[in-house]
Image: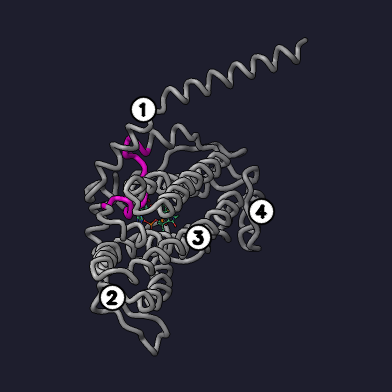
Amino acid sequence: MVGWGEGRMDTTHSSPLGADGAEPVLQQHFDATIARDQRIEPRDWMPEGYRRTLIRQIAQHAHSEIIGMQPEAEWITRAPSLRRKAILFAKVQDEAGHGLYLYSAAETLGADRADLTERLIEGRQKYSSIFNYPTMSFADVGVIGWFVDGAAICNQVPLCRSSYGPYARAMVRVCKEESFHQRQGYELLMTMMRGTAEQREMVQDAVNRWWWPSLMMFGPPDDASPNSAQSMAWKIKRHSNDELRRRFVDMTVPQAEKLGVTLPDPELRWNEERGHHDFGTPDWDELMRVIKGDGPCNAERMERRRTAHEDGAWVREAATAHAAKQAARAEKGAVA
Ligand SMILES: CC(C)(COP(=O)(O)OP(=O)(O)OC[C@H]1O[C@@H](n2cnc3c(N)ncnc32)[C@H](O)[C@@H]1OP(=O)(O)O)[C@@H](O)C(=O)NCCC(=O)NCCSC(=O)Cc1ccccc1
């Protein structure tokens, strides 16, 4: 894992004229499309930096969905009822779907899916810091749905208006499912809060552990976010990291009150003048450490992903052989 601004993608896909040789008219057309809030589509000319930024963000997003299956999947076999097991199963499966959908979006930019997977497995590409924390009790499943999917919604709803068509369209479906995920998490927590004192303690403990890492999901503060300015100018990102973090806090505080839990931030209070909540500063050193690979579960998550990839080698080989056979048959049929 690498730090801010390091380890940028070098997966390039040459544009018809090449970034440097772009004729002004193509650049002007691109700029005008962005200015009119219209979409850039895969066959349109785009600056090389735009393509690379999108591949970086979409690949990291896809990796996050795939690695993000792990923390909750650990509880599938230990779910307290058949109903909770079925719900969790479906949710984790949805995350797999989001990952595959996003890899497809990256492919429309010329990225190779197998190459992106290699980059993840070799630690050359990032995934969200949030998935490097352990799930200690079943209440964590509820809190992940409430906080992590809630944060994902805050971050991803504006991405439905992202300037790159395939990414924006993928986000529409992903957000619908994330919204369902958030509700199931909150409903699970409401149920636990109506339960025993021990269950309420489990919920509060999970809230205490996940609150700050959830705020870190939005990325470094704006003045330490190397990609934000350009990504916002290109309308890939519609809001800054801090802006989305503030939205998440404003959205979550009343939900916490209704649930009856305390968010672990003594500085958290409503600011009448600003019409928003004031809140404390996340531990940015911790975020850096986790991104660099030194979080509580980084090694475990990567090892599991690597093993799953190796175990799946025979499926990929069989699918490739089958596809080759089908293609040969189709060709033979066409000749006859
Ligand atoms: C906001 C940001 C994450 C970062 O803004 P940018 O403008 O791109 O970067 P910025 O200049 O601010 O940062 C500098 C460097 O630091 C990296 N970095 C920053 N923050 C983090 C971090 N927290 N963790 C790790 N790395 C982080 C950043 O990539 C950049 O790397 P570079 O070295 O340049 O390559 C943006 O990429 C985005 O909106 N992505 C799409 C959404 C997305 O990917 N969501 C994932 C969660 S999906 C989910 O939760 C669903 C689910 C729920 C439940 C269960 C299962 C699944």
The spot of residue 12 in percent (x, y) is 49, 38
Q: Marks 3/4: CA distance?
A: 39 Å
Q: Marks 3/1: CA distance?
A: 32 Å
Which residue lies at the image location 39% right of the left edge and 33% below the top edge?
118
Q: Marks 2/1: CA distance?
A: 43 Å
> Residue type at mark 4?
His
Q: Earlier in the sequence, mark 4 or mark 2?
A: 4
The spot of residue 80 in percent (x, y) is 34, 54
Q: Marks 1/4: CA distance?
A: 45 Å
Q: Give the range drawn in magenta.
A: 120-134
Which residue lies at the image location 31% right of the left edge and 39% below the top edge?
123
Is residue 223 in view?
no
Q: Is residue 173 above or below residue 268?
A: above
The spot of residue 286 in percent (x, y) is 23, 58
Say if the magenta span includes residue 271: no
In contact (CB < 8 Å): disc 1 and disc 4 = no
Taking depth in this image into account, of 42 and 233 the one nearest to the observer is: 42
The circle drawn on residue 262 is: 2
Taking depth in this image into account, of 287 and 148 the one nearest to the observer is: 148
Q: Quarter of the image containing the C terminus? A: top right
Q: In this view, does 86 lie to the left or right of 197?
A: right
The spot of residue 227 in percent (x, y) is 41, 56
Residue labelled with disc 4: 29
Residue at the limit of the structure toward the bottom, as seen here: 273
Q: Nearer the viewer, mark 4 or mark 2?
A: 2
> Residue type at mark 2?
Thr
> Residue type at mark 3?
Phe
Helix, strand or loop for disc 4: helix
